Image: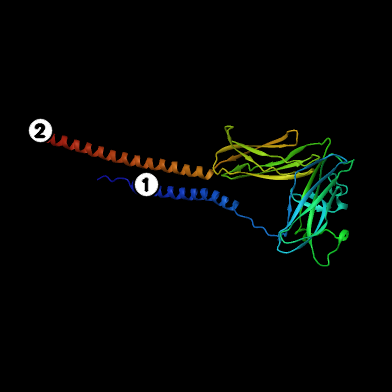
């Protein structure tokens, strides 16, 4: 008697291998972007000294002035603590740190040769006062622009810092804190002045970094803009993402932030699409200045979910293997039946011949 092939056992083995491979591949493929999202969404805690003052406004608009002119304005300071505070007020120039965004006050002697110095033009009164709990104090600000002031931007900060109510130094002998520990409780207002005249405006994109190859999103991008102008610029930069067919997928708009003269500021943007396939292009546009100038840069990257593709291939190969096994199984059964029928037909013919004889 003819035996059938053990296809059922083989079929089960193929199915188990296919399912195990698929689960392993898809498990890693889907877990990776989820982990990436979880890590990117972690909140970064911050700590610092408790502030007892709030400057109003913390950052006014740019003040346009002419050489030799005098401009008057005011700022306010609120004591947000539950007790009276003795406040000393000073004006200092500032420089921007290497990150391109953090202002650091510098002394008058340090700021004297700076092209964008402003502190020596500003008179603030009063320079000392006591504010009661939640009291709002107003400060008069007078800006006296020299006749030979250079056109363009000039920058300073009006600083307020608490001093002891008893035994404090009076008047001009009061010194502004200079160490990092002394700077921490200070608050203030940044003052931007633009002197009329011919101003040079120029900016360039120092770098535009995009990963060349990613399996899945989000895709983090970083670019740096250098300001070579005589005044700060506030570009409203954007990145247009296009797919392999040149179709716009999305536009990433960044917040408009100041870039001070002779400084470079870094920006980040995130293309938060998780899945993608093929080459993409990122087109960076940085408009700046009052005359509509613009600088651009382009970068390309690939999104290719290779583990997902591998999983699909495993599925297809498994289905192909299963179909071949099933087909051979049924073909074998058909061949067996055909042979049995032929044997029966031969047997019938033999019996018929015997009957006739």
| Residue in the foreground of this view, choosing between 43 and 93 | 93
Q: Residue furthest right?
A: 148
Q: Nearer the viewer, mark 2 or mark 1?
A: 1
Q: Position of residue 209 (x, y in %)?
A: 67, 42
Q: What residue would you read off at disc 1?
A: 11
Q: Which sits earlier in the primary sequence, circle 2 or circle 1?
A: 1
Quadrant in the rendering for residue 166 = bottom right
Q: Nearer the viewer, residue 131 or 36?
A: 131
Query: For mark 2, what is the residue?
Result: 356
Q: Secondary structure at mark 2?
A: helix
Q: Nearer the viewer, residue 134 or 246?
A: 134
Does residue 230 appear to the left or right of 39 in the view shown? right
Q: Within the image, what quadrant is residue 206 found in?
A: top right
> Is 281 placed left or right of 309 in the picture?
right
Q: Is residue 357 visible?
A: no
Q: How is the image coloured?
A: rainbow
Q: Residue at x 76, y 38 (%)?
A: 203
Q: Position of residue 60 (x, y in %)?
A: 75, 46
Q: Which residue is painted at 42% across and 43% down in the image? A: 318
Does residue 336 appear in the picture of this structure?
yes
Does residue 188 sit above or below 164 in this rendering?
Answer: above
Position of residue 249 measured from the top left corner of the image (x, y, whole percent): 58, 37
* Quadrant where the C terminus is found in the figure: top left
Mark 2 crowdedness (10 Å alpha carbons): few <14, some 14-19, many ≥20: few
Residue 329, which numbered label? none
Q: Quadrant of residue 42?
A: bottom right
Q: In the rendered view of the protein, which quadrant contains the N terminus?
A: top left
The reply, left or right, for residue 100 in relation to residue 324 is: right
């Amino acid at each position: 008697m003819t035996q059938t092939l053990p296809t059922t056992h083989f079929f089960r083995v193929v199915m188990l291998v296919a399912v195990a491979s698929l689960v392993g591949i898809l498990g890693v493929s889907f877990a990776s972007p989820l982990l990436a999202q979880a890590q990117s969404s972690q909140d970064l805690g911050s700590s610092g000294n408790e502030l007892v003052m709030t400057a109003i406004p913390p950052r006014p608009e740019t003040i346009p002035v002419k050489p030799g002119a005098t401009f008057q304005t005011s700022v306010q300071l609120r004591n947000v603590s539950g007790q009276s505070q003795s406040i000393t007020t000073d004006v200092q120039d500032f420089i921007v740190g290497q990150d391109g965004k953090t202002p650091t006050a510098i002394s008058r002697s340090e700021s004297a040769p700076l092209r964008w110095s402003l502190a020596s033009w500003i008179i603030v009164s009063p320079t000392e006062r006591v504010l009661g709990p939640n009291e709002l104090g107003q400060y008069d600000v007078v800006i006296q622009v020299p006749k030979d002031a250079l056109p363009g931007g000039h920058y300073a900060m009006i600083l307020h810092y608490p001093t002891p109510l008893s035994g404090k130094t009076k008047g001009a002998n009061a010194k502004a804190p200079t160490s990092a520990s002394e700077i921490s409780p200070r608050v203030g207002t940044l003052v931007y002045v633009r002197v009329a005249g011919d101003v040079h405006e120029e900016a360039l994109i120092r770098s535009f970094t995009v990963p060349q190859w990613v399996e899945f999103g989000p895709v983090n991008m970083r670019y740096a803009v250098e300001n070579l102008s005589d005044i700060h610029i506030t570009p409203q930069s954007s990145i247009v993402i296009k797919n392999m067919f040149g179709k716009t997928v999305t536009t990433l708009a960044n917040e408009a932030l100041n870039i001070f003269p002779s400084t470079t500021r870094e920006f980040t943007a995130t293309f938060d699409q998780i899945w993608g396939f093929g080459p993409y292009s990122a087109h960076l546009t940085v408009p700046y200045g009052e005359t509509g100038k613009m600088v651009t840069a382009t970068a390309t990257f690939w999104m290719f979910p290779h583990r997902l593709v591998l999983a699909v291939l495993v599925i297809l190969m498994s289905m192909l293997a299963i179909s071949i096994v099933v087909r051979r199984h049924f073909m074998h059964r058909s061949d067996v039946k055909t042979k049995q029928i032929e044997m029966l037909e031969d047997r019938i013919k033999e019996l018929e011949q015997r009957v006739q004889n």
